[in-house]
Amino acid sequence: MATIKVKQTRSRIGAPKDQKRTLDALGLTKMHRVVEHEDTPSIRGLINKVHHLVTVVE
């Protein structure tokens, strides 16, 4: 299955708790970290929820 790389580009400071939990679920704990996940609808939903804090690295 295809994979997708996600990079945290903005700080979690000031974000609501649910968005912080979403970043934790994606495995993003610090700025400029890149994690790789399978490209599934559930992962796409998590990315969509915090789209203003992360970028998708191709």
Image (tube, rainbow, N blue to C red):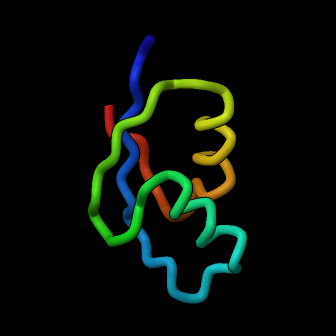
Q: In x, y percent, where is residue 24?
A: 52, 63
Q: Quadrant of residue 20?
A: bottom right
Residue name at image x 46 percent, y 26 percent: 38
Residue name at image x 40 percent, y 45 percent: 6
User: Which one is nearer the viewer's eye here, 25 or 51?
Assistant: 25
Q: Quadrant of residue 5?
A: top left
Q: Quadrant of residue 29?
A: bottom left
Residue name at image x 67 percent, y 27 percent: 41
Q: In x, y percent, where is residue 34?
A: 29, 51
Quadrant of image for the C terminus: top left
Q: Looking at this rendering, what residue extends furthest in the bottom direction?
A: 14
Q: Looking at this rendering, what residue extends furthest in the top direction?
A: 1
Q: In x, y percent, where is residue 8?
A: 39, 61
Number of callouts: 0
Quadrant of image for the N terminus: top left
Q: In x, y percent, where is residue 12?
A: 50, 78
Residue name at image x 51 percent, y 86 percent: 13
Residue 40 to residue 31: above or below: above
